[in-house]
Each structure stands twice: as structure tokens, then as C-alpha cells.
Amino acid sequence: MTFRGTSLSLALGLVLASSTSSFAVTEISWWHAMTGANNEVVETLSKEFNESQSDYKVVPVFKGTYPETLNAGIAAFRAKQAPHIMQVFDAGTGVMMGAEGAIKPVADILSMGGAKFDKSLYLPGIVAYYSKPDGTMLSFPYNSSSPILYYNKDIFKKAGLDENNPPKTWPEVWEAAKKIKTSGAAKCGYTSTWLTWIHTENFAAWNNISYGTNENGIAGTDVELKINAPLYVKHFQELADLAKDGTFRYGGRTSEAKPLFLSGECGIFTESSGGLGDVVKSGMNYGTGQLPYDPDAKGAPQNTTPGGASLWVFAGKSDAEYKGVAAFFTFLSRTDIQARLHQVSGYLPVTLAAYEDTKKSGFYDKNPAREIPIKQMMGKAPTENSKGVRLPNLPQVRDIENEEFENMLSGKQTAQQALDNAVKRGNAAIKQANGQ
Amino acid sequence: MASSTRVTFPNKVLPYLLLAPQLAITIVFFYWPASQAIRQSVLREDPFGLSTQFVGLGNFKRILSDPNYLNSLQVTIVFSIATAVIAMGFALLFAVMADKVIRGKGVYRTLMIWPYAVAPAIAGMLWLFLFNPSMGTFAYMIRSAGYNWDPLLNSNQAMLLVVAAAAWKQISYNFLFFVAGLQSIPKSLIEAAAIDGAGETKRFWTIIFPLLAPTTFFLLVVNTVYAFFDTFGIIHAVTGGGPGKATETLVYKVYNDGFVNLILGDSAAQSVILMVIVIGLTAIQFRYVERKVHYG
């Protein structure tokens, strides 16, 4: 009892001390999952915002990986200690959308800031992914990216491939990879991060085929997966066949394959456009290209979908605090801030003005790789197959897919079996998540 | 140990006061979370706790009929036996060897105990850096030697890797107990056997090993509990439960279902089952070890 008593009075004292010291300034807490250079961006942005006005103070707090941050936010909400702003990764979007009582739509908040919220200022493909079926924007897109192709020019030269002409389709990638392997230019031809995000979710959008019913979950949470359709089976069987002799190398479920490309072990690589920074830093002679598509698919290439993360606002805060959040989001939307964010971090600009600005400045002439993901996403108006994938439990479904892919790549099952299992297990998990 | 010399306190309040801090800690850090787990295990709830539904034993029923749960039970058994046997085998070997060293005994022993101070997650990272197929030094050597080392896809290799990391960390602890056990064996017994003509191997198996039995049994329980519950950090760092579900132990599945998949009811039900297992293991340890085996 004494133990509890002292800790209670101690906590009270702390609360009193902190509330008196921050009198007059409304603090806005921002939980995020950014590390390294991207963490510095978060710190800089908060500092600049805090110095630009005196009513609000944004306090960024690093909470670990994306899933850890999401869990911390959920636990805090349950304990009635939720932060104001939380960064949630793409796969967590469905989880947040399912919690209507816990969040406040960003569209509502932005209009509270005084200025009228105009959705048309933002990049349509990104905004659509973070909006409800009725069009209400729920979260603020902070860092968006899309998968692109990277290749090692030195290895291409050694293998006798055209170093200025990256493969455009998957069959071309397989051919180039085989040539790299057989010529001995590198130990492995091709590797990829995020098989789930790149080879199923974006594969669906880019080739304009269905990932699941109900517009891949965008139109409703009741989804049946379609990822065992023939085009997927063919694609994954080809990948599994290439894995047998090491022409394709598996690196892991998320970004673990990156060192395989950076160390020169593999010649071709598909990865998020946000990964460009590390490729540049490695000092290698690299080239970039669009994400490959399947030439058998009608209408391919269609458009790719955004990955990355967005900022969510928790419900139950005071109006003054929401006004502060609105002011911060308005600050983040400023053209100069967005343009800089895009050029420095490699993430996509959120507003059209920032894109136009960057284009005019001639930045893309020097850095063509920065424009590839934007062109991929904006090239065509999205279809019902290409607005992205949103499931109430996408992280879980991704794990199921990964497990089946691993058992396929190790030769325990064929692509057909792997994808059939993934669909069966995934559908059951989605049903459970929907409370059925 | 001291059951015959019972001490009585005249003061009625003091013993409770002295116990209070310990009790408070037990309540706050054990009973309270444990009761929360039991409560959660009979509920079905969305991650945010916005809607709650009582489902009775529904969560338990679903888990126990889930082939993935049975798979992780099997993985846990294989993993625990392998870890305990390897960790204890090597520790015993090292303890017997260290016992023979005459000069620099202290230094040897101290060095042997060091790995125990390494945190599980860090031990996992160390082994990952050595054996990860993309960047590991040893992995590179193994691959260069023509062996297809790929624990990212080969489930047996993945299991081998986590077992090795987990056992490596536990060897020190076991070593410490075996050394203490060896020291308590009377030298006269061994010398008498030597005079009777028993060779070194014979002396080990007929005298030393049986006399170490209490220590061995104690360590068996401790190592099993360790492999069950304390190896989460290693598995999380090295394999993340993969490839497939090849290294997903019961504890890892609790974490995965609760914190990645956000199915709180299922996760809580699993942790309640684990709680029952720990209680069982502890009961065995107290009943069997404390009563029937006396330490020299």
C-alpha cells in the first residue's frame, strides 16, 4: 500500500509540474516509427513548426517499429492515454478504419483549423487509399512510397546486358536474371523485399487483376481473396523455379533482402521507392526502372498503390488540441515543406503543387528515380483492382502469405498449393477479424 | 533444509509488514496481470476495446482445434528438448574438464560464466550476424564451402540456429551448477574407485554422474522452463518464427496473435494455457526435487 501511495503522489507531482510548465502552450504528442535519416526529418519538422508559432508545441516520440507503434497507440487508447497523432503503416489502415469510435477523421480536423479543407489539392491515388468508401479522408498521408525496380549497372555490363535498358516485364526480368547467374556476373540474378506488398498487392494493381472481392476491401470489410487466380500462380511458380538454383534469392519477409543487392550479390532488385536513399548511400553504380508487369495481363501496366504510412488522430481530445493538430497538418501541406520532404526523403509529395514545383525546378532531370513512383501512381485513373488493398487484418494476412511463400520457395509445395492455402487461411482469418 | 529449527516471532504485525513489499510486488506484477489474462481469455474484443463480447470457453476451443497451435506445441517440445539436452550436455562436459584444471581454475570458470550475462535478444542478434545468409560471416564461409546454408527457407537449419543460440546462452548457467555439484562429491570416493582399478570413464558413469543426479534433475526443470519462456527474444531476433511456422513456439505464438494479429482473446487464452504449464512444472520441481532429492 505504501508502495502504491508513494508512486501515486509522485505521479501526481509530475503531472502538476509538467502542466504548470507548459501553461499557455498546447502540447500535441506525435508518436512515430521513423528511424535514422527519416527520424531527423520528423525532429526538424516539429522544431520548425514549433518555432513558426507560439500557441502549440508538437512533441514527437519514437515508439519503435511500425507494428510496435500501432500496438503502443492501441494500448494507450485502452488506458485512456492516447497521443494526439499516431503514425500508422499502410497495412494497419484497415485496423484503424475499423475503430470508428477511437479516431477523428482528418477531413474534420483540417476544417476546424479555419481554412476550408480542399481534397483536390492532394494526390488522388494516395488520398483515395486513406479515405472511407464515401470519400471522407480519415488520415493524413505523411510518407508514401511505391515499389520500383533497381539494378546494378556494373553487373549488367559484365553479364552483357544493356545497362541503359532495364527489364520492363517479368519475363524480361527472369531472362536478365538467368543471364546474370549463368554468365557469372553475380551469384544471384534477382531479389526482392516485401513479396506480399510487391508481388501480390502491387502485382494485382499494376496488372489490373483482382486481389480480393469488394474492390480489394476498399469498398467493404467483407473480402474473399482472389490471389490464387492463374496469373498469380504462373508468376509465383516462375519465382519458385528460379529459387531452385539461386537465380532468385529470398531475403526475408520485409526489407531484409536489401543487403543482397547493396553488396552486389544480386543484380536486380525490387523495393520501395523510399529505399532509394540507402542505394545512393552505398555508392554503387545503379539504375532504376518502373516496376515490371506481366505482358499477359490486359491493360497492364495500370497503376501501383501507395505504401508507407499516414498520420491518424485519436478521438476524445479538446477543441484547442484539435486546432493545434490542424495547424500542424496545414503546415505539413505547405508546398515548400512538401517539396523539400519529397526531395530529401524520397517519399512521394502529398500535394499536387509540391509535385509541380519539384518538376519545374528541374529536380527530376537530375534524379529521374524520384519521379518513377509518381508516374506509376498517377499514370492512369485507378480501377476497382488498383486502389490498393485494405483488410481489417492485413498484417495477419501478409504473415499467412509469407508463411506459404516460404514453404513454396523451399520446395515443400507448388505455387498453386501455396496460393490455395493462403486464400483458404486468409479468408478464415478475415472472417474471424470481422467477428463472423 | 532447516525444518527442524523453527523460529517463532512474538510480534504479530512485524512479519506481515516485512512481507508487504514482496506481496505488493507479487500482486502488482503477477496476480493482477494474470487475472487480466484470465478475464481476457473468455472475451472476444476488437483491438481498441470498443466492443466486448463474452464467449465463455470459445477461445480455448478454437485454439485447441487449430492445427497451427498443435504445430507450435510440437515445435516447442522439439525446441525445448534439443535446447535442454545440448545446453546440459556441453555444460557437464565443460564442468568435468574445468574440474581437472589445476592452474588458473578461477579464470576458466569466470570466462565460462560470461555468456549468461548476455541478454537473449542480443544473443539472438549475435548469432544472426554470424549466420544470416545475407550478411553473416560464418554463413558466407559455409556457403563458400559448397553447403547450401539458408535458414531463411530451410526449416531444419532455422531450428538448428535458434537451438544453438538458446543453448549457447544457457550453458554458462548449467556449468555453474555442475561445477558446484562436482565440488560436493567427496574426493575419497573417487580415489577409492581409482585404487580399485576403475578407469576414468567408469568412474564418471558409476560415481560422478549418479551423485550429480539431483543437480541434473534440477537443471532439467530450469532448462525446460527457460526454453519454454525465456527464449522469445532469441527467436524474435533470429527467425521471427519462420520459415513458415517452423520455429514458432507457444510463447512466440502468444506474442504474434496478440501483438501482430491483434486477436486479444486467442492470445490471452494461449497465455492462460502457458500459465497452467508453468504451474505444473513448478509443482513438479517442488514436489519431486525438493522432497526426494537432498543436496549434499
Image (cartoon, coloured by chain):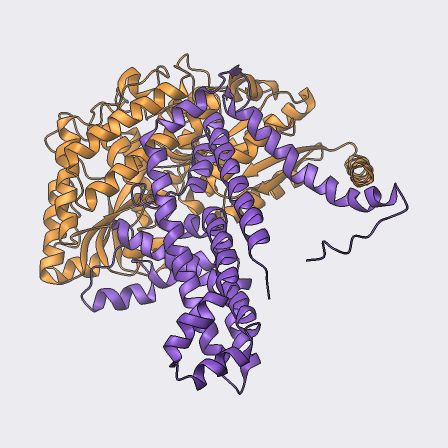
Chain colours: A orange, B purple
* For residue B101, above or below residue B60: below
* For residue A152, above or below residue A84: below
Q: Position of residue A213 (x, y in %)?
A: 27, 17
Q: Quadrant of the C terminus of chain A?
A: top left
Q: Position of residue A193 (x, y in %)?
A: 30, 45
The residue lying toward the viewer, choosing from B234 and B90, is B90
Quarter-of-image position of residue A29: top right
In this view of the protein, can residue B100 be seen by the observer? no
Seen as rendered, the residue at the extreme front is B196
The residue lying toward the viewer, choosing from A177 and B201, is B201
Residue drawn at x 34%, y 35% as measured from the top left: B70
The residue lying toward the viewer, choosing from A45 and B168, is B168
Q: Quadrant of the N terminus of chain A?
A: top right
Seen as rendered, the residue at the extreme right is B11
Q: Is residue A94 left or right of residue A366?
A: right
Q: Position of residue A164 (x, y in %)?
A: 17, 52
Residue drawn at x 39%, y 32% as measured from the top left: A395
Number of labelled discs?
0
The residue lying toward the viewer, choosing from A315 and A357, is A315
In this view of the protein, can residue A89 be seen by the observer? yes
Residue drawn at x 36%, y 64% as measured from the top left: B130
Q: Is residue B191 left or right of residue A227?
A: right
Q: Position of residue A261 (x, y in %)?
A: 27, 55
